[in-house]
Amino acid sequence: MSTLRFRVVEEAFKKKPVDVPVPSELPSEYFGKYVFNQEKMRQYLPTEAYTHLMNAICNGAPLERSMADRIAEGMKTWAVEMGATHYTHWFAPLTEGTAEKHDSFIEHDGRGGVIQEFSGKLLVQQEPDASSFPNGGIRNTFEARGYSAWDPSSPAFIVDDTLCIPTIFIAYTGESLDYKAPLLKALRAVDKAAVEVCRYFNPDVKKVIAYLGWEQEYFLVDEGLYAARPDLLLTGRTLMGHESSKNQQLEDHYFGAIPTRVAAFMKDLEIEALKLGIPVKTRHNEVAPNQFELAPIYEECNLANDHNLLIMSLMRKLARNHGFRVLLHEKPFKGVNGSGKHNNWSLGTDTGILLMAPGKTPTDNLRFITFVVNTLMAVYKHNGLLKASISSATNAHRLGANEAPPAIISSFLGTQLSNVLAHIEESDDNDFSALSGKHGMKVDIPQIPELLIDNTDRNRTSPFAFTGNRFEFRAVGSEANCASAMIALNTAVAHQLTQFKKDVDALIAEGLSLHIAILHVLRRYIKECKPIHFDGNGYSDEWKAEAARRGLDCETSVPLIFDNYLKESSVKMFEEMGVMNRKELEARNEVKWETYTKKIQIEARVLGDLVMNHIIPVATAYQSTLIDNVYKMRDLFPAEKAARLSAKNLEIIEDIAEREIAIKAKVDELVEARKVANRIADIREKAIAYHDIIAPKLDEIRYHIDKLELSVDDRLWTLPKYRELLFVR
Ligand code: ADP
Ligand code: MG
């Protein structure tokens, strides 16, 4: 009798929502309570230090050492007042999640006691003994030093008793070993390139900011049930489990009433997130049972990304206070919606204009079209790279299945924007009727009508959709660091805008007027990037064939998709934009291939263990009961009658035996295949072997396990079933 499974289900059912104390203040009052934000900087820093710091934050100006000392002192005073005793450099190495090493503020006071101290040196730079972070061979053992360096543009914050200082993480020789360093470089590149283009329309623009608004999807599972599933515990997903008779077919979960225990968790999470300065705004049920979504108001990309990393760790931590585990894996359950992290992305100017939004005047709209078309060009030219930026062993299970975008990057524009682009493409410059703008201003661009883009026609299957004033990169995985996608996208757009500027300037040099030159180039681009534009159903087989004809990257093997990072066009782009060099790209790919291999390796081990320790023993026990019954039938009835009455049981006995044989054979094959693959020295080749040979075997084994789950006595089955994992809360 499976006591553990029944006990955890029963306990989960009995759990009541946790009482979440609601702060007496309004959210606007406790927002950013734990953040060393501008308000606290003004309060805790001498004026000169404050001015220098703001200049560093807003304009990237270097900070002098003496200033750093004063900033560190102010930061420490605030942190200690808030109850912090420790500080840490908080960074995002090439794993998922963040890394931190806590040091306390205490130093000798020279008189046998201690004082709380924090110097500028410790704020600005540290050398974490970090030779065991993934680095793809950049740091061999005798050059194992790496250092973390303060990113003043993302404010420090307090978690529990620790002051967390966002930092980049780089090798002693300068190569980046994290996500933040290249992200900051990509953001600088897109700022520079976009400012140049903006000045065609408005000479006052000094800065362009990339914005990111992520939507985080996740599952919640009762922690008792979770603990009884070794696969969830060790791999983040279920490696087996027959589909529940009911799952999402009634579409009754999406936007449904939020279950009370979950609502308490969400409330708790939101309060804590707001205190950490994360402007969370939206929460709702997602498509699959026990699946939910959380979204903040969009922010500057680097900050938004730090906030996403922070909220993922906050979710993991707080879920436990509510008796849940949060699943951030992209595909914890087969057959239902997976989890993504839509990255809503746009560019905006320091003059307050959203560049991906249509405006009131024809000039505004020409600017709007310019940025949209250049984005499409960037996505078109680098569609394989963008796919690589969101690819992982885990996200591979999600793409192309149950409402997730397919593994081919294309862009959805909607009817209105598509019509506008078609109109521009067909127009010609001789057709000048000197259209009057809104305020009687003469603008020579009759091709640009007044635009009112609404985003009502939506397309869930598009990986990169235009949604009114932004693009929504939906292929990003729920567990991923958004920076990976944001590095690729912002660099590609920066590179493209740089090219656009060159193309337009060349035509101006030939004597064309500015607007005509822009239109000429746009017309050419619209034609060229047409293959990326697709408004249809991304799931259809026709689209797969069509996409291949259009020359889009249709590769589905993750290790091969990673090759896109090392294509000449990618290396050139990253190097020209000063974001990453070849050596860094090569090192990062090594990390990607290695991580891919390890993930599947772990899954293979866990499944082997489940089979031998859970599935086969249970199936055999049930089979023995049936065999016992068959023998007893023979004692009770004449042979012929006994045979007839036992026919069904005999069938099951045989079926179990056949499946056990098949499973055992597959597991043996799996073990053998791993031995062979593990001997492959080349990291890329090894990952390919894991993809081609090992991963499919996991599915084959699962198939038989899931069939056994259907026939074995429910009371014997030890592992919580899909219906429990998905519906008990
Ligand atoms: P939906 O589920 O309809 O896509 P949500 O409201 O859940 O929309 O999420 C939209 C996300 O997009 C939010 O994080 C929002 O702040 C963000 N967003 C809105 N406008 C922009 C913009 N111009 N640039 C970047 N992100 C944006
Ligand atoms: Mg969305």
Image: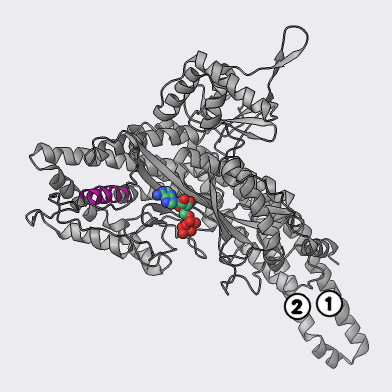
Question: How has the structure been colored for display?
Answer: one colour
Most foreground residue, 132 or 620: 132
Image quadrant assignment for residue 530: bottom left
Provide residue 264's location: percent of width, then percent of height: 69, 55
SS state under label 1? helix
The answer to whether residue 343 shows anywhere in this view is no
Q: Residue 626 bears which disc, if any?
A: 1
Residue type (three-letter) at the residue carrying disc 1? Leu
| Residue at image coords 70%, 69% | 659
Provide residue 557's location: percent of width, then percent of height: 47, 53
Residue sitting farthest toward the top: 111
Q: Is residue 570 above or below residue 289?
A: above
* CA distance for labels 1 and 2: 8 Å
Is 514 positioned to the left or the right of 729 in the image? left
Q: Residue 652 bears which disc, if any?
A: 2
Most foreground residue, 222 or 358: 358
Residue sitting farthest toward the right: 635
Disc 1 + disc 2, Cβ < 8 Å: yes
Q: Is residue 371 magenta?
A: yes
Mark 2: few/some/many CA within 10 Å (<14, 14-19, 20+): some
Provide residue 363's location: percent of width, then percent of height: 21, 48
Question: Which quarter of the figure is the C terminus placed in?
Answer: bottom right
Question: Which quarter of the figure is the N terminus placed in?
Answer: bottom right
Magenta span main SS:
helix
Q: Earlier in the sequence, mark 1 or mark 2?
A: 1
Provide residue 446's location: percent of width, then percent of height: 14, 56
Region of the chain picked out in magenta, as a range: 363-375
Q: Residue 291 bears which disc, if any?
A: none
Q: Is residue 395 above or below residue 117?
A: below
Is 674 positioned to the left or the right of 45 in the image? right
Q: Is residue 176 magenta?
A: no
